[in-house]
Amino acid sequence: METKSTEPTEFSTPLLLSSSSRRISSSVPTILLLLTTLVAVSGSYVFGSAVGYSSPAQSGITDELNLSVAEYSIFGSILTIGAMIGAIVSGSIADYAGRRVAMGFSELCCILGWLIIAFSKVAWWLYVGRLLLGCGMGLLSFVVPVYIAEITPKDLRGGFTAIHQLMICCGVSLTYLVGAYLNWRALALVGTFPCLAQLLSLSFIPESPRWLAKVGRMERSEYALQHLRGKNADVSQEATEIRDFTEAFQQQTEASIIALFQLQYLKSITVGVGLIILQQFGGVNGIAFYASSIFVSAGFSQSIGTIAMVTVQIPMTALGVILMDKSGRRPLLLISASGTCLGCFLASLSFFLQDLHKWKEFSPILALVGVLVYTGSFSLGMGGIPWVIMSEIFPINVKGSAGSFLTFVHWLCSWIISYTFNFLMGWSSTGTFFIFSSICGLTILFVAKIVPETKGRTLEEVQASLNPYPTKS
């Protein structure tokens, strides 16, 4: 798409900031909106199943292909390398080809990756398949929450976007459960089913009205918006707001990743990058990828621990979805970060007691409680809300480059944690979880001081409050 330049501009607060009390359109979800969201979050389930695969598959793969701990760490962590590659191109594909095309392309990568893993005979084919799966995940992790945020009314946006995290948890949890009964090859083949489901359904859902407005298809944008809100809904105010806000920012040159670090976008970048880094360095992917080995190291039953994690994850994520638009983003983040801090501290205490050879009967239970408190608390807020906020805070002219950058940062941090986790545990299990607990403590301070509340505001209102709004002088 050609970029536009204009005369010098001055920046002021838009009139739309004072429109928060105006009713834009009905916030009652339509059947089409519900079905469209369901199709989109099928990709989130794929994301979760890929993350959850390495834990139940570990013993089968290492035994059959005779992999060392280091080789399996490469297999587990190369998913995040692929996700970084997918993240780099995610914004460009979603901006230039559309949100639906981006989701379809990601599913093709995932299907090919699952098939290669399922039929691998040597380790390097496993790596190729896992890398392709990661590329698809990198795309999905950006485009799914952005697409859902762009199609939903402001009063439903938080809860609907948080379904992304709920489906990730469902993917992780069900993969853990199914993996207890299927071998690793069959489990990989099962992974192709949700990919095919989304791929075949994409042609039946509308494109994002905000993306259509961005590329100048105003009539189609309003048509898609009307269908999503219902034939009797008054969408005139929302359509006008989308058009005016998009045109104002489109007058500026499309921002590159380097241009994101201008003063104009400093608040948004600080919030987005900070949440992503703290989310990942709190240890989530190390715990998710290697849950089975954590329970074994703690002297607890692997199967009971895994089932307990599944039992906690899904209800707590569902609770987060319900509370998202009632309590707001910041209160949930504060509660969630406090819980993850406590959970990691309890796990650290458990391993500390083992090192001292004290309370031997009690310490495995303490490790289980710590992991469950961490998992439940993370699922409540820290898992989904950073993605919700990321999809809300950037204006349309930088959403693609900002999304690519933040998704890349997410997967880079995820790779660092997932690759080093086994080595950290070998160094000191106590120290590993104490570090995670400390980072979760820093998250509480970051949320309390810097993260804004976005509940009950349109995307345009949120973006204008964080980013200076260009108007012609």
Image (cartoon, rainbow, N blue to C red):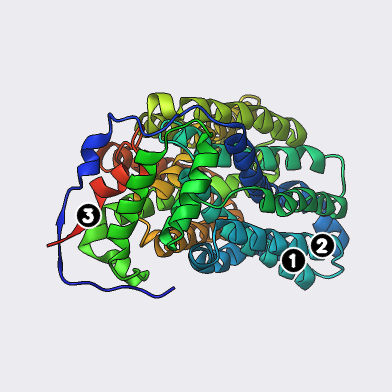
Quarter where residue 65 is shown: bottom right
Rounded to the nearest whole Å, what is the CA distance between mark 2 and mark 3?
Answer: 47 Å
| Left or right of 13, for residue 197 | right
Q: Can residue 385 be seen in this view?
A: yes
Quarter where residue 237 is shown: top left
SS of the residue under disc 2: helix
Q: Which of marks 2 and 3 is nearer the N terminus?
A: 2
Q: Earlier in the sequence, mark 1 or mark 2?
A: 2
SS of the residue under disc 1: helix
Name the residue beneath numbered marker 2. Answer: 115
Look at the numbered discs 3 and 1 and tell me whether their residues touch, using CB distance below 8 Å. Answer: no
Question: Disc 3 residue type?
Answer: Tyr
Name the residue beneath numbered marker 1. Answer: 129
Identify the residue at image location x=46%, y=54%: 219
Name the residue beneath numbered marker 3. Answer: 469
On the image, the x and y values in percent for residue 131 come to 67, 66
Question: Disc 2 residue type?
Answer: Leu
Identify the residue at image location x=35%, y=52%: 243
* Residue count near mark 3 (Cα–Cα under 10 Å), binned few <14, some 14–19, many ≥20: some
Q: Nearer the viewer, residue 362 or 123?
A: 123
On the image, the x and y values in percent for residue 270 come to 30, 54
Above or below, 138 against 325 in this view is: below
Label annotation for residue 82: none
On the image, the x and y values in percent for residue 93 come to 54, 66
Discs 2/3, front: 3
